[in-house]
Amino acid sequence: MKVVVDMNKCQDHGQCVFAAPDVFSMDDSGHLAYVSDPDDALRDEVEEAADVCPLQAIRLEG
Amino acid sequence: MNARIVVAGASMAGLRAAEQLRAAGWTGAITLVGDEPHMPYNRPPLSKEVLAGKAPFESLAFRPRASVADAEWRLGTRVVAARLAENIVEFDDGEALSYDGLVVATGMRPRRLRCPGPLAGRHTVRTIDDAQGLRQALTRPGARVVVVGGGFIGCEVAATAVALGAREVTVVDPLPLPMVGPLGELLARALLKRHEERGVRFALGTGVTGFTGDDHVTGVALGDGTVLPADVVVESVGSVANTEWLDGNGLDLSDGVLADEHLRVGGRPDVVAVGDVARFPNARYDGVPRRVEHWCIPTDTAKHAAKTLVAALTGTGHDLSPFAPLPTFWSDQHDFRLQSFGAPVLGKEDVRVLEGDLDGDVVVGYHAGGRLAGVVALGGQAAAAPASRYRAELLKQPALTA
Ligand SMILES: Cc1cc2nc3c(=O)[nH]c(=O)nc-3n(C[C@H](O)[C@H](O)[C@H](O)COP(=O)(O)OP(=O)(O)OC[C@H]3O[C@@H](n4cnc5c(N)ncnc54)[C@H](O)[C@@H]3O)c2cc1C
C-alpha cells in the first residue's frame, strides 16, 4: 500500500492525523508529515483518513 | 441475493453511506438517487476556492471507494414520496422502487428571504451551479455586494468577495455580532474586528425588510430605514431540510428527520438517516436530538448508521454503543481559519483564552460546570496545532450534560 498526499492541495487541517495517527502527524509548526508506505494492516485507518480530508488530498495506491 | 438498499440523496452523506454499507458487510444492491445532475462533490470550496476561481469542478468531485463501483446511480432523479410501511419509494419520473433498507440522505437547501422586491440579483450558495452563478456576478467590475446573514457561509462569501475586488461588501445581520451563535461574544468580537480590518463592512442589529429595483436588485432596505446600494445580494440565512418526500409516514419532520441514538428513523429497523438532514441525540452530551451541519457529520453518521442497518437487514446482532461523535468544524475566512472541536455552545457562559491572544493566533476554551466543553482556534497554523491537543482532552471527557 502506498499513500500519496497532494501537497499542493493539503491545507493542514489535521483530520487525517486524528483518523490515522500511525501514518499522519503534524510537526510543531502545524504542517503535515506522513509515512508513504505504511503496513497493510493500517489500510482501514488510511482509507478513513482519505475520507475525512476536507481537501480530498489523500490517495491510496495498491 | 436480490436485496436492495436505496439511498435517497446522492451527495457526500449518500456516498459515504454507500461505502460504509459495503464496509459493514452489505453485499446486496445499492441504488443512490440524487436530484442534482452531478456525482457527489465537496461543498466547502463553493464559498471559498470555487468563488475565488481557484478550484475547477473536477477538483471537487469525491473519489468513490472501489467497494461501491457496482452501485447504481440515478442522478437527475428526485424522490417524491415514500411509503415506509410498504418499503417503496417513488421518483419524479413515475417509477416506484421497492427496498429492503432505506437511507435518508437528502440534506438541506438554503432558506430564502420572504421580502418584497425583485428576485434577479439575489443568490444562495449550496450547489456548484449556485457558486458558478454567484462567481459571475461577483467578478463584474465594481460590484456592490450585500451579504444577508453573518453566519459562517455569509462570512466566508464576504471574505471571498473582498478578495475578488468587489467595490463594497456589507454583511447584514439582526444579531449584534457575526457568528455569535456558535462562537459566543468574545470570539465573535475578535472576528468582527478582523473582517473590518480587511475591508468588510457590517450592518448589525437590523434585518432586511425588502429589496429595491424593478427587474434587478439595486438595493437592500433595512429595518432601521437605511437602503444599502447593491448589485449582488447573497442570502445566507440558514437552511431548510429536504424531507417533504417523507410526508405522510407519521415521522417527526419538524427539523430534519428525527432519528434515535443509532440513527434509526421512526422506530423502524430498516430506515436510517445520515448527514445534515439527520436530527439525532449525541450520547456525548445531553439527550436532546439536534441536526449538525458540519462537514465531518456525513462521514460519522454514515459509519454508525450503516452498521445499524446492515445488522438489522442481515439478522446479525449488533452491540453498538450509542452514537457519540465529537463535533468538529472549520471555516476559512480571509487569511485566517476558525477551527472548532467539541460543543462550544454548551460553554458560552464561561469563556477563557487558553493560548495566544485575541489579536493574533488564539485558542479559546468554553467551559460548562468548570469543565472544558469545546475549544475554538482562530488564526493561522500556530493556533491550529494546540487546538488539536485540546481535542484529545475533549475526547477523554465523560459525557457532559447541559
Ligand atoms: C457553501 C458551503 C460551505 C461549507 N463550508 C463548510 C466548512 O467550511 N466547514 C464545515 O465543517 N462544513 C461546511 N459546510 C457544510 C457541509 O458541506 C455539509 O455539512 C455537507 O455537505 C452535508 O452533506 P449531506 O450529504 O448531508 O447534504 P447535502 O450536501 O445537502 O446533500 C443532499 C443531496 O440530496 C439531494 N436531494 C435533496 N432532496 C432530494 C430528493 N427528494 N430526491 C433526490 N435527491 C435529493 C440534494 O440535491 C443534495 O445533492 C459547507 C456547506 C456549504 C453549502
Image (cartoon, coloured by chain):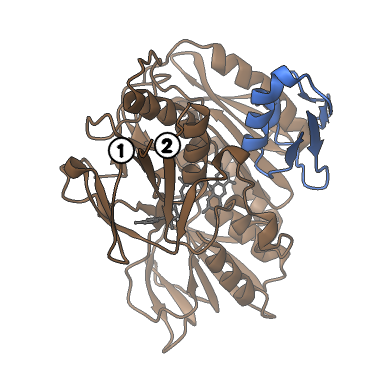
Chain colours: A blue, B brown
**Residue B162, image quadrant:** bottom right
Percent position (x, y) of residue B204?
48, 57
**In front: label 1 or label 2:** 2
Residue at left offset 42%, top offset 16%: B400
Location of the N terminus of chain B (image quadrant): top left
Callout 1–callout 2 Cβ contact below 8 Å: yes
- Density class for disc 1 (Cα within 10 Å; few <14, some 14-19, many ≥20) is some
Q: Residue furthest front?
A: B1
Q: Is residue A29 left or right of residue A15?
A: right
Location of the C terminus of chain B (image quadrant): top left
Q: Is residue B231 left or right of residue B282?
A: right
Percent position (x, y) of residue B253?
24, 45
Say which chain tag 1 marks.
B
Q: Work out whether residue B343 can be spotted.
A: yes
Q: Report how far apart the C-alphas of labels 1 and 2 lie in the structure.
A: 10 Å
Residue B324, compared with residue B57, is above or below; it is above
Say which chain tag 2 marks.
B
The three-letter code of the residue at mark 2 reads Gly
Q: Work out whether residue A21 can be spotted.
A: no
The three-letter code of the residue at mark 1 reads Asp
Label 2 sits on residue:
B28
Secondary structure under tag 1 reads loop
Q: Nearer the viewer, residue B330 or B192?
A: B330
Percent position (x, y) of residue B333?
66, 50
Question: Can you tell which mark lies on residue B100?
Answer: 1
